[in-house]
Amino acid sequence: MKRLAPYLLILPGGLWLAIFLVVPMVFMASVSTQEGDMVNGFVQTFNFSVYGDALALYQTQFLRSAGYGLVATAVSVALAYPMAYWIAFKGGARKSTYLLLVLLPFFVSFVLRTVSWKFLLADDGMILGPLKATGLVPDDFHVLQTTVAVIGGLVYNYLPFMILPIYVALERVDPRVVEAAQDLYAARRQAFTKVVLPLSLPGVFAGVLMTFVPMTADYVNAGILGGPENTMIGNIIQTKYLVNNDYPTAAALSFTLMAAMLVGIFAYAKVLGTENVLEAAAR
């Protein structure tokens, strides 16, 4: 019984993944190679050419989604790291309060939070309306339906997913290690770059994974805050599934997006060095 204990522990999670991840993916793979329509039904024909056709037709949206995801992830790291650092090392007894404030937006629906920004950033909204009335910005200035609005929405909605893992990694850094570096005549910048930053890499690594993947596949921010020129691949997949009922193309696009992100994640892990990350996490 003792030998079976590890397998029994992973059994519930394994069954969950098998039922709600593996089975739908197998079904989606089968749908992607079918042909037909909603009236006459779909038939399995192993039509793999749909992958090439979908990639050729929507490569612009693929590249745009990857670009938005990369920029939004980089901005999130730049914003989240100082915030997590301050909470971990300067937060004192109010760390829990600050973390609650970080998580506070999650008490409101993802879609509602994004829609609220649409009202705030409207041309005659609470922000731009007074600015235009006072002449601080020109009348033709607008934020909605721009790349800035979409990337800003992505950063806003996914920033806590970057802050929390970085905070956890920084919280594990023993202050005595930093003090030891300073006792050995390391400047504050050297203590940070040689001690704190390497030890916090597991948090950065996890944060990038937790934000880049959903950002790249997101369709809510582009749909609400963006315009026709900001359409992401998630919007195309949503339209193919729910509007056009073109299930094979939608499934092929979903698989292509997943494969592209897996390649990107493995390349990212290779560049960053998972061994170094795991070594730092084990310290």
Image: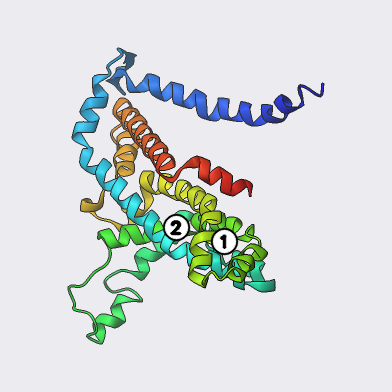
Judging from the image, the colouring scheme is rainbow
Q: Position of residue 155 (x, y in %)?
A: 40, 59
In the picture as drawn, the residue positioned furthest to the bottom comes out as 134
Front one among 9 and 250: 9
* Residue 102 vertical placement versus 257 (above, below): below
Residue 98 makes an appearance in the image:
no
- Residue at 51% over, 25% down: 22
Residue 148, given in percent of the width and then of the height, sits at 29, 62
Q: Callout 2, which amino acid?
A: Asn
Total numbered labels? 2
| Residue 157 tag number | 2
Q: Which amino acid type corresponds to the residue marked 1 in the rendered image?
A: Leu
Q: Does any portion of residue 3 appear in the rendered image?
A: yes
Q: Residues within 10 Å of mark 1 (few under 14, many from 20)?
A: some
Q: Residue furthest right?
A: 1
Q: Residue at x 57, y 26 (%)?
A: 19
**Labels 2 & 1 near each other (Cβ < 8 A):** no
Q: 173 and 171: which one is in front? A: 173
In the image, farthest residue toward the front: 184
- Residue at 27% x, 41% y is 62
Where residue 99 sits, quadrant-wise, is bottom right
Answer few, some or many: residues within 10 Å of disc 2's Cα (few below 14, many 20 plus, some between 14 and 19): some
**Residue nearer the viewer, 89 or 117:** 89
Q: Earlier in the sequence, mark 2 or mark 1?
A: 1
- Determine the secondary structure under disc 1: helix
Would residue 63 be found to the left or right of residue 264 on screen? left
Cα separation, mark 2 vs mark 1, equals 11 Å
> SS at mark 2?
helix
Q: Which residue is mark 1?
A: 103
Tell me where residue 230 appears, x and y as whole percent. 25, 52
